[in-house]
Amino acid sequence: MKATMVSTDQIVRVEKQVARVWEGVTEKGVPFVAYITMVQVRASEDLKQFERELVHKQADRWTLQAIDLRLII
């Protein structure tokens, strides 16, 4: 599967782990919510640039409903 995800401003706890909520869509157009607990940047890459690109958008209504319902696979 290929997908595009955008980080949101929402932080939640998933099974004792802190996770940032990301909104995504598959290349076929199926929307989803992802709960990301860790992202690793290769040591050879510019971590500061990665942090600058990690722009947080406000979560949309559908995402907030998914968080409330705990739709986690």
Image: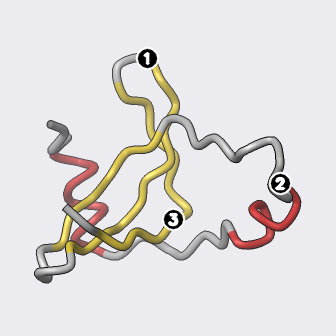
Asked if residue 43 is positioned above or below residue 49 in the image, the reply reads above
Left or right: 67 as drawn, with respect to 48: left
Q: Position of residue 60 (x, y in %)?
A: 35, 76
Going from N to C along the chain, the mark reached first, 2 or 3, is: 3
SS for dot 3: strand
Asked if residue 46 is positioned above or below residue 28 in the image, the reply reads above
Asked whether the beta carbons under mark 1 and mark 2 sit within 8 Å of each other, the answer is: no
| Residue placed under numbered mark 2 in the picture | 47
SS for dot 1: loop
Q: Position of residue 43 (x, y in %)?
A: 81, 41
Left or right: 45 as drawn, with respect to 39: right
| Residue placed under numbered mark 3 in the picture | 7
- State how far apart marks 1 and 3 are (Cα): 20 Å
Please name whichever residue, 4 or 66, is drawn nearer the observer in this view of the structure.
4
Farthest-out residue, front? 44
What's the residue type where badge 1 is placed? Answer: Lys
| Residue placed under numbered mark 1 in the picture | 16
